[in-house]
Amino acid sequence: MIVIDLISENPKNKFAPFQRMANAIIDLTRKNGGCLPEDLLAAGFTKQETDDYWHMSFAMACVELKLMEDEPLPRFKREKRYAGAKA
């Protein structure tokens, strides 16, 4: 199976446009308490970019913001595991 990335030919840059917008959403959310697609126009994004990337970028930003919070995720336990160790 071959997956063709229409945004970038470099697989490492596949989510770059989404991550750039997610970073702006995070900054605006931390500064203003929230972010709407219209807010990104003042941050240098075009209307077309917000139409194309908003949903995925917003989801990525929500995950990152949740991980930045002090409270751990519900039913999520952090632990160290080492290769070869039996649990």
Image: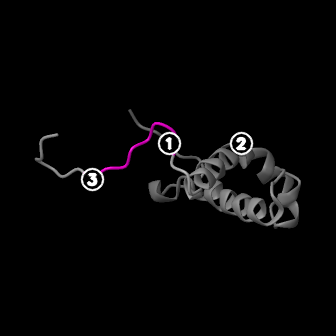
Mark 3 — residue?
80
Quadrant housing residue 51: top right
Where, quadrant-wise, is the N terminus in this rendering?
top left
The mark that comes first in sequence, 3 or 2, is 2
Mark 2 — residue?
55
Residue at position x 81%, y 58% in the image:
33
Asked if residue 63 lies left or right of residue 81, the reply is right
Asked if residue 39 lies left or right of residue 26, the reply is right
Residue at position x 83%, y 62% in the image:
32
Report the magenta residues as a range: 73-80
The mark that comes first in sequence, 1 or 3, is 1
Under mark 1, the amino acid is Ile
Q: Where in the figure is residue 28, as x and y percent of width and height?
A: 78, 63
Type of secondary structure dominating the magenta stretch: loop
Give me the disc on residue 4.
1
Q: Where in the figure is residue 83, as x and y percent of width and height?
A: 15, 50
Asked if residue 37 lies left or right of residue 7, the reply is right
Residue at position x 81%, y 54% in the image:
35
Secondary element at tag 3: loop
Q: Residues within 10 Å of mark 2 (few under 14, many from 20)?
A: some
Q: Where in the figure is residue 14, as x and y percent of width and height?
A: 53, 53
Under mark 2, the amino acid is His
Under mark 3, the amino acid is Lys
Where, quadrant-wise, is the C terminus in this rendering?
top left
User: Between residues 46 and 20, which one lies in front from this camera angle?
Assistant: 20
